[in-house]
Amino acid sequence: MKVSEIARLVDAKVFCDCGEDTEIRCAFACDMMSDVLAFVKNQAVLITGLVNPQVIRTAEMMDIPCVIIVRGKEPTPLMLELAEDSGITVMNTKLRMFAVCGILYNQGLPADTGE
Amino acid sequence: MEDLHLEFTVVPDDFTRAGEVSGKVKKTLKDLGFPPLVVRRTAIAMYEAEINMVIHANGGKITVTINPDVITVVFADSGPGIPDIGLAMQEGWSTASEEIRDMGFGAGMGLPNIKKSSDYMDVQTELGVGTTITIKIFTNP
Ligand SMILES: Nc1ncnc2c1ncn2[C@@H]1O[C@H](COP(=O)(O)OP(=O)(O)OP(=O)(O)O)[C@@H](O)[C@H]1O
Ligand SMILES: [Mg+2]
């Protein structure tokens, strides 16, 4: 599923566009960056309600190409600066985490199984 | 290629900058052409250890030695030390505060994840003196 398609499906506003055509194969939803670091194995899209620079750093280390911030929270300027540097797309949506997961799952985006 | 030595200082109490060193080293390894998995494993282990230095100790020093066959990273801090390393290595064991958890860390996954992401891990720690962690990642598995 393309990043642009994800943005359309969850009605997201894209702040830092680092490749609308990037192909996403799976997703991981979590507010604990510790768990993202321990469980994500593939280049998943990260769905999170956490807003701080470590969200982008975590994505950077994990080769996560796209971060979706839920519940209408706004990314900070430092987050966008870091995302720009690392080529990570950042978007936000007013939807809550469960809704975002449900919509993307329904449209065929699977979970990152950690394998 | 000769061994490449890099040294960094991790500043204490600046959560927003935690991860800067790991990010820099990741870019260097990528530019040097190491395989993506080697780059990612090094980055994950480094980032976990760097975050630990900021939240559990008062910053410290990171030394990276890059050789075509092996990447060695030493994290040295003069923080409080780890009372029971056997316990600390267990998944889920953490002394992190509520404040740290609110920032997305403190699940007790870091040390086990460093071990999983690297090929060798050694922890030397003494209460009131500090902690030194050495990791190695072999580049041709
Ligand atoms: N450099 C250090 N100095 C002192 N204590 C440390 C250090 N690194 C880890 N510890 C101790 O070991 C515990 C376990 O560390 P670990 O990295 O596994 O989990 P965490 O940092 O608490 O949470 P997470 O890594 O999941 O965000 C910490 O809670 C802390 O008590
Ligand atoms: Mg940790």
Image (cartoon, coloured by chain):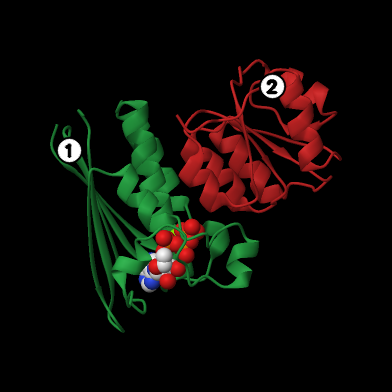
- Coordinates of residue A115 in the picture (x, y in percent): 45, 29
Tell me where residue A89 sits by quadrant. Answer: top right
Specify whether B55 is left or right of B84. right
What is the chain identity of the residue bearing mark 1? B
Residue B67 circle label? 1
Residue type marked 1 = Asn
Does ligand 1 reach within 8 Å of label 2's beta carbon?
no
The chain painted green is B
Specify whether A81 is left or right of B91. right
Instruction: Nearest to the eye among marks 2 and 1: give it.
Output: 2
SS label for mark 1: loop
**Circle 2 sits on which residue?**
A3
Determine the residue positioned at 77% across, 39% down. Answer: A98
Residue type marked 2 = Val
Q: Nearer the viewer, residue B48 or B15?
A: B48
Residue B6 circle label? none
Disc 2 crowd, CA 10 A, few/some/many (<14, 14-19, 20+): many
Residue B11 in view here: no
What is the chain identity of the residue bearing mark 2? A
> Outermost residue toward the left?
B2
- Give above or below for B113 relative to A63: below
- Coordinates of residue B10 in the picture (x, y in percent): 40, 63
- Coordinates of residue A8 in the picture (x, y in percent): 82, 22
Specify whether A12 is left or right of B131. right
Determine the residue positioned at 82% across, 31% down. Answer: A12
Determine the residue positioned at 42% across, 51% down. Answer: B47
- Coordinates of residue B42 in the picture (x, y in percent): 34, 42
The chain painted red is A
Specify whether A12 is left or right of B21. right
Q: Are marks 2 and 1 on the same chain?
A: no
Tell me where residue A81 sits by quadrant. Answer: top right
Q: CA distance from mark 2 to mark 1?
A: 37 Å
